[in-house]
Image: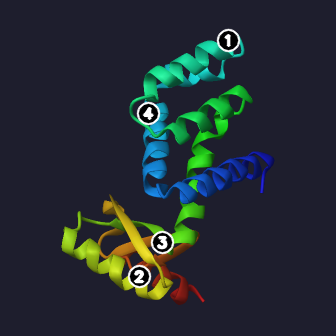
Amino acid sequence: MSRDAVVAKRYAKALFELASNGGNVSEIEAGLKLVVDTLNQNEDAVKVLSSPNVALEKKAELVESTFGAQVPALVLNTLQLIIARGRQSLIADTYEAFVKIAGEALGQAHAVVYSAKPLTDEELAGLSAQFGQIEGKTIIATQVAAPELLGGVQVRIGDRLYDGSLSGKLERLQKSLKI
């Protein structure tokens, strides 16, 4: 694990402890997601936050004006701390670590479902329930269209990939025939 990942995990763990004591873990997670999504869409803000030529007060004002009314105070204070310590590059890593820590503590797991065609809400809920039984957790699924799969689905939960796609089956068949 890299040094940055360790530091991001420490921020996330501290933030989770404060959020769980306050009973607002999901609000904090949503606030962090909003911040990460906003920064991913706005390169200029990232440049300003990472520039050593911009004073800390200006960076704090930027964060306050951009996110002040949209995120909980705990998220805002954490952002201020991360930026004051010159570790703004860890914001996305902190969010990912927070999601992982919160998921483990609350018995949840995030899954990405790749399918050749968009799934209906019922199909996605069925997959979530089925994989929830396998993992022993509540599965929060998001779907991604991947036409290259030809049919079926691939489900990624953490580091595991469950491949029930037609392209995956064809690939495994090809490997078995080459032996």
User: Distance of mark 2 from mark 4, alpha carbons?
Assistant: 31 Å
Residue lying at 57% horizontally and 70% vertically, measured from the top left: 105
Q: How far across and how far down the image is residue 65, in percent?
A: 45, 20
With respect to residue 64, does 76 lie above or below? below
- N-terminal label among 2 and 4: 4
User: Distance of mark 4 from mark 1, alpha carbons?
Assistant: 21 Å
- N-terminal label among 4 and 1: 4
Residue lying at 52% horizontally and 24% vertically, measured from the top left: 63
Determine which residue is flagged by label 3: 108
Cβ–Cβ under 8 Å for marks 2 and 4: no
Kindly report which numbered mark, 3 or 4, lies closer to the viewer in this rendering. Answer: 3
Q: Mark number for residue 131? A: 2
Q: Mark number for residue 105? A: none
Residue lying at 32% horizontally and 78% vertically, measured from the top left: 127
Q: As shown in the figure, which amino acid type bears the numbered disc 4?
A: Thr
Q: How far across and how far down the image is residue 112, in percent?
A: 42, 64
- N-terminal label among 2 and 3: 3
Which corner quadrant holds the N terminus?
bottom right
Query: SS class of the residue under badge 1?
Result: loop
